[in-house]
Image (spheres, rainbow, N blue to C red):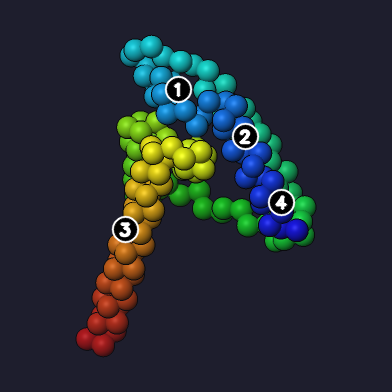
């Protein structure tokens, strides 16, 4: 049942992206082009998304289980750290250069778009690089901690 709801949610999300024009990199880039031919229409899409997300999180905070009976797993950290800011900046630069973010990239991939395929491959490579760097960082911290105790 959970997989069915995940599939339906993904299909509705993808359809919404297509209808809103978010899966069209040219439309997204026109929205980001504040100094040129700015297209403000995606601001309405973002505003609607923020409003719905805010409402959903407000309702979710009052619950201990999802509607499907699963435990609620909401983020608890409110800390702005280097990782969050760095990730946000990296995401913004990528979005600004390509006009694509992860959700629309999957829609484009499903439609057979070359741009979508290139973006998804680059996204997966970035995720892999992050995992490698994270493991190296954790290993280095563990080595430092281990050597600090024995010394």
Q: CA distance from mark 1 to mark 2?
A: 16 Å
Residue 52 position (above or below residue 134): above
The first of marks 1 and 2 along the sequence is 2
The residue identified by callout 1 is: 27
Q: CA distance from mark 2 to mark 3?
A: 31 Å
Q: CA distance from mark 4 to mark 2?
A: 15 Å
Q: Residues within 10 Å of mark 2 (few under 14, many from 20)?
A: some
The first of marks 4 and 2 along the sequence is 4
Residue 5: assigned label:
4
Residue 77 position (above or below residue 137): above
Q: Position of residue 15 (x, y in %)?
A: 62, 34
Residue 129: assigned label:
3
Q: Position of residue 108 (x, y in %)?
A: 48, 38
In the rendered image, the residue lying farthest to the left is 151
In the rendered image, the residue lying farthest to the bottom is 150
Q: Quadrant of residue 91?
A: top left
The reply to whether discs 4 and 2 touch (Cβ–Cβ < 8 Å) is no
The first of marks 2 and 3 along the sequence is 2
The reply to whether discs 4 and 1 touch (Cβ–Cβ < 8 Å) is no
The first of marks 3 and 1 along the sequence is 1
Give the quadrant of the C terminus: bottom left
Q: Nearer the viewer, mark 3 or mark 4?
A: 4
Q: Nearer the viewer, mark 2 or mark 3?
A: 2
Between 91 and 6, which is closer to the camera in this rendering?
Answer: 6
The residue identified by callout 2 is: 15
Q: CA distance from mark 3 to mark 4?
A: 31 Å
Q: Nearer the viewer, mark 3 or mark 1?
A: 1
The reply to whether discs 1 and 2 touch (Cβ–Cβ < 8 Å) is no
SS at circle 2: helix
Task: Examine the rendering and report whether any part of residue 101 can be seen.
Answer: no
Name the residue: 27% across, 78% down: 143
């Amino acid at each position: 049942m959970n997989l069915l709801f995940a599939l339906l949610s993904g299909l509705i999300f993808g359809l919404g992206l297509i209808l809103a024009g978010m899966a069209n990199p040219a439309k997204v880039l026109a929205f980001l082009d504040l100094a040129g031919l700015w297209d403000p229409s995606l601001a309405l899409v973002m505003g609607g998304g923020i409003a719905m997300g805010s409402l959903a999180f407000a309702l979710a905070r009052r619950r201990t289980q999802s509607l499907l009976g699963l435990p609620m797993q909401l983020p608890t950290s409110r800390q702005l750290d280097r990782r969050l800011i760095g990730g946000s900046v990296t995401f913004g630069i990528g979005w600004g250069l390509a006009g694509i973010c992860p959700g629309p990239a999957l829609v484009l991939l499903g439609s057979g778009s070359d741009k979508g395929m290139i973006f998804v491959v680059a996204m997966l490579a970035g995720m892999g690089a992050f995992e490698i760097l994270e493991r190296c960082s954790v290993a280095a911290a563990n080595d430092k901690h281990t050597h600090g105790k024995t010394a």
